[in-house]
Amino acid sequence: MGLTCPHLSPGRLSQNWESGKANAKRKGMRREIRADYAQIDLFPQSIEDWVPADHPARFIREFVEALDLGELGFRERESEEGRPPYANDLLLKVWLYGYLARIRATREMERACREHLSLLWLTGRHAPDHNTLWRFWKENRGALRKVFRTGVKVAAEQGLIGMICHAVDGTKIRAVASRRTVEHREELEKVLARVEEELARMEAAIEAAELEPGGDYRLPEGLREAEKLRAAIGESLGKMRQAERAHLHPQEPEARLMPCEGRTDPAYNAQAVVDAQAGIIVAEDAVTAEADNAQLVPMLNEVEANLGRVAKETVADGGYSSGEQLAEAEARGYEVLVAAGVETGGPKRGEYDRTEFTFEEKADEVICPQGQRLKFEGRKGKGSPGVEVRSYRCTHYGECPVRALCSRRKGGRRIELSPQSSALLRQRAKRRDPVQQGLGRRRKVIVEPVFATLKQALGFRRWTVRGLENVRAQWALLCTVLNLKKMYAHGVASRRAGAENALRRASTALSRPLTALGEFRAWRPCMRDRCSPTFFYATNPACRPEY
Ligand code: SF4
C-alpha cells in the first residue's frame, strides 16, 4: 500500500472531480479554465510574490546589489531638475537579465521592461527607454568589464574555480558589417587607375574644345562625379596605408576579415580562458588580430589580474603555438601546454628536419633522430640586434650512414637555438609526456562547451555593436552572464541537493520502523497550503502520510 497525503488522496480527488463534472453537466456548462478579467484581489499584491524564490532574476538582483558600482567606476548621473535619473543598479540589472534572456537590442529591452514579468519585478515596474539604456552602456563600458572581474572573484569565493587546469581558446564572431561592402586595396587601386584614365580623357577633351575657335565648350558630364570618386578612393587607400591593411570596411574599420562559420567575414576575435572545474570563464578579451598566436601571454596576464595567479597548467590548441609567446610564458613562470602548431622557418627535411631534434636541458645537448648527441659549441648573435643563439654541432657525421639526408655542411649538422626555439623544443618534449597528452585532450571538453552555449543557448552569433571598445564591453557582459548562469545552476543544484539530503534524512528517520515492517514504498510530499516538502511533518500536521 502506498504512502499518500489525505489532501491528495485519489479517492477524495476523484470524488470532488466527479461532483464538479455532475454539477457542470446539470447546469449545461463545459468545464474550462477561462480568464476572468473582472476579478479583483481581496488583498493588494506584493511585487515580491511575482517571481518564485529560485528564479534567475532574483539571482541577478542579489549579484548586482552586492556590487559597489561606484567603486567599479559606474558613472553617477545627477539631475537637478525634472525627472530623477534611473539608478545604475536598476539599469545594470536590465542589461544582465536581458542578455540572460537573449534580449540584446535596447528597443527590445525597453519593450521587455514593460511586458516581461521578471523584468517588471526586477525593475520594480519601472521601464527605462532605449535611449537611457544605450546611454548607460556608452558611459559605463569600462565598468562593465570590471563587473566581469568581480563575477570571477565571486565564483572563486563559491569554490567554483579549481585553478588546476585552464583552457584558452578564441572564437571568431561576425561584426555588424557585410563582407560585400568591404573595400579591398587591390580592387580600389584598379578602379582608381580606371578613374584616372577617364579623368585624363575628359581633361584632354576639354583642352581640345578650348582650342577650337568659337567651339561650344561644355563641361563633360560625370567629371565632377569622377573627381569625387577619385577623392573617396584616395581617402580609403590612405586609411588602409595608415592601418597597414589590405582590406577595410568603411563603417567598421576595426573589424578584420576572418574565417567565420565556413566563410570569410569582417569579424572580431573573442578570447576566453575557462577553468576546468565548473566551466567558469576566468579571463576574457576581444581583439582585432586574425590569429591566436600572440594571445597566449596576454590572456594569462588577464587571469593573473583577475585571480592573483594562473592555474597549475594552461592548455591551448596549435593556433597559440609561437616561440615568442612560449618563451615569454616561461620567463613569467606560466605553465603552458600548447598543441603542435604549424612550424615555420625554412624547407622541411623529412625525418631529419630540425623539428625532429630534441633538446636535453640538463645535459645541454641536442639529440638527433639517429640518437647522437650534438654538443654545445658556442653562442653568437643572429638576426635582430640583441638576439643571441646557442649553437650545437654534430661530431659523428663522419660515421653517420644518413649524413647526406641530414646535412650537406662539411663541418656537420648544426642546430641553433634561440630563446624562442629552445622554448619550442621544451614544449615538444612536454607534449610527448603521456600525462600531458591526457591533459591536452581535455582542452576541447573544457573550453568548447562555453562557446557552444554562447552560440546555441544564448543565440549569439554576431556582435550587435560596432567598434572594438563596444565589442570588448559586449564580450565582457556575455562572459559575465555565462558565469552567472553557471553560478545560478550551481546554487540551485546545491540547494536541491541540500533539500534532498534533508528530505532523505527526514524520510529515513520516519521510514525506519516502516521499512523494518516492509510496508514503506513511496513518499509523495504534499504542497498543499505551501508546506515545505522538506519540513512538512513539523509545519503541517494535516499532511501526515497515510499508509
Ligand atoms: S649527421 Fe649527425 S646529426 Fe645528422 S643524423 Fe647523422 S649523426 Fe645525427
Image (cartoon, rainbow, N blue to C red):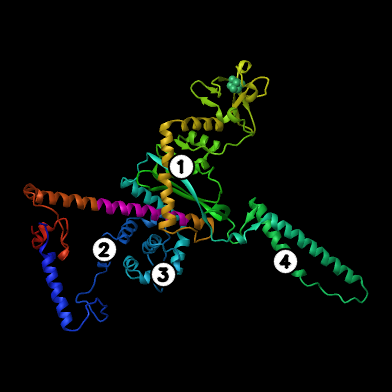
Q: In terms of secondary structure, where does tag 1 sit?
A: helix
Does any portion of residue 334 appear in the rendered image? no
The image position of residue 139, as x and y in percent, is 47, 61
Quick check: which quadrant has ligand 1? top right
**Which residues, given as a range, are shown in magenta?**
473-495
| Local SS, label 3 | helix
Distance between the Cα atoms at labels 3 and 2?
Answer: 23 Å
Question: Which amino acid does the dot numbered 3 rest on?
Answer: Glu
As for residue 477 lying within the magenta part, the answer is: yes
Q: Which residue is mark 3?
A: 110
Indicate which disc residue 228 carries: 4
Residue labelled with disc 2: 52
Q: Is residue 163 visible?
A: yes
Q: Secondary structure at mark 2?
A: loop
Mark 2 vs mark 1, CA separation in Å: 40 Å
- For mark 4, give the secondary structure: helix
Position of 198 with respect to 2 (left or right) is: right
- Is 247 on the left or on the right of 108, as rendered? right
Residue 33 image label: none
- Is 60 in the magenta? no
